Amino acid sequence: MNIKQSKEIIISAINDALEGKAEITKDMQLIGGESLLDSMKLVEVCLALEDLADEHGFEFDWTSEAAMSKSRSMFRNVAALAEEFANQSEV
Amino acid sequence: MIIVTGASRGLGQAITERLSDIGEDVLGLARNTSGMNIDAIECDVSDYASVKNASKEVKRMKKPVKAFINAAGVASMNMAVTTDESSVQKLIQTNLVGTIYCCQLFAPIMLRQKYGSFINFSTIAVALALKGESVYAASKAGVESFSRTFAREMADFNVRVNCIAPGPIRTDLLRGITDSQIEKITSQQVIPKQFQKSDICDLVELLIDKKAASLSGQVLNVGGV
């Protein structure tokens, strides 16, 4: 999966979680004070991404140390999550 | 399916047997699964990678997980000043960190289902501040605190988290503890008697039952404090 496909999947999953109520950009934060996603919505996005990864034949691991660490977290913004999702699809 | 850690002996084994007897589909997690007569996965709860591998294996089974019971644990009855460094590390790593690892890595399965129940194990030594159990009680106090907060984090997903805090139950963990020492502890309970593994199994049955749907974030002190 390339980054472009991955980004489309991520944006779609976030859009579903936010019920289309916000414009989603690549710089949009997914954790921290400026995130539009509360913890429950973030979990919903992760579960949706697990399903989508399954459809694409790989396992999406969102409980890794890299996922949880704020400084280099895959949740720091949409672009980082898309990059990680694409990376995991190649493993 | 119900998952039980520490399923190869002691309380974990007793819980596993009880749940199997009442017709539940039980999966045991244990460091050594040889000789176990139920489905089991080798797992050292104190090792993050080991718990993660077990959680991945369970996810691949694609079975609903009704409950996860953190029964794995170690004990050391010593004053703090006579507890060696490795025992301190082992107590905290297995009892507290192991429980946290299992909860955080198996929670996504229940979050997806939007139901489930975690049962963690503390000890009555926390509430009674029992002399000679300071490090052990500290590790379990951490479990209680973690469980209360984790219960709030899981509540939006209809997942309940509770603790059972037994007094002295006759298992390997009590090796070397005399009857008079046990009586000294149980005399401090509201119901001053020594409870058995079967009493703890009864509480497990209660907590996984739909009738306990209103209970979360609670610590059930066996015998009362």
Image (cartoon, coloured by chain):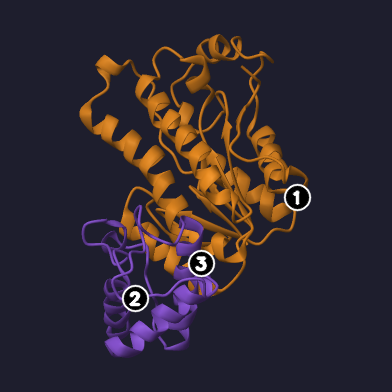
Chain colours: A purple, B orange
How many residues crowd mark 2 within 10 Å: few (<14), some (14–19), many (20+)?
few
What residue is pinned by disc 2?
A: A25
State the mark number for residue A44. Answer: 3
Q: Chain of mark 2?
A: A
Which residue type does callout 3 highlight? Glu
Question: Which-is-in-front pick, marks 2 and 1?
Answer: 2
Percent x, y for residue B87? 28, 31
Quadrant in the rendering for residue B25: bottom right
Residue at left 40%, top 38%? Answer: B95
Q: Is residue B163 above or below residue B131?
A: below
Q: Circles 3 and 2: CB distance less than 8 Å?
A: no
Percent x, y for residue A75? 32, 65
Gap in angstroms between the C-alphas marked 3 and 1:
25 Å
Q: Quadrant of the C terminus of chain B?
A: top right
Q: Chain of mark 3?
A: A
Viewer-closest of B101 and A49: A49
Viewer-closest of B131 and B35: B131
Question: Which-is-in-front pick, marks 3 and 1?
Answer: 3
- Residue B35 appears in the figure: no
Percent x, y for residue B47? 32, 52
How many residues crowd mark 3 within 10 Å: few (<14), some (14–19), many (20+)?
many
Gap in angstroms between the C-alphas marked 3 and 2:
19 Å
Q: Circles 3 and 1: CB distance less than 8 Å?
A: no
State the mark number for residue A63. Answer: none
Residue at left 44%, top 39%? Answer: B73
Gap in angstroms between the C-alphas marked 2 and 1:
43 Å
Which residue type does callout 2 highlight? Thr
Q: Are the residues under marks 3 and 1 on the same chain?
A: no
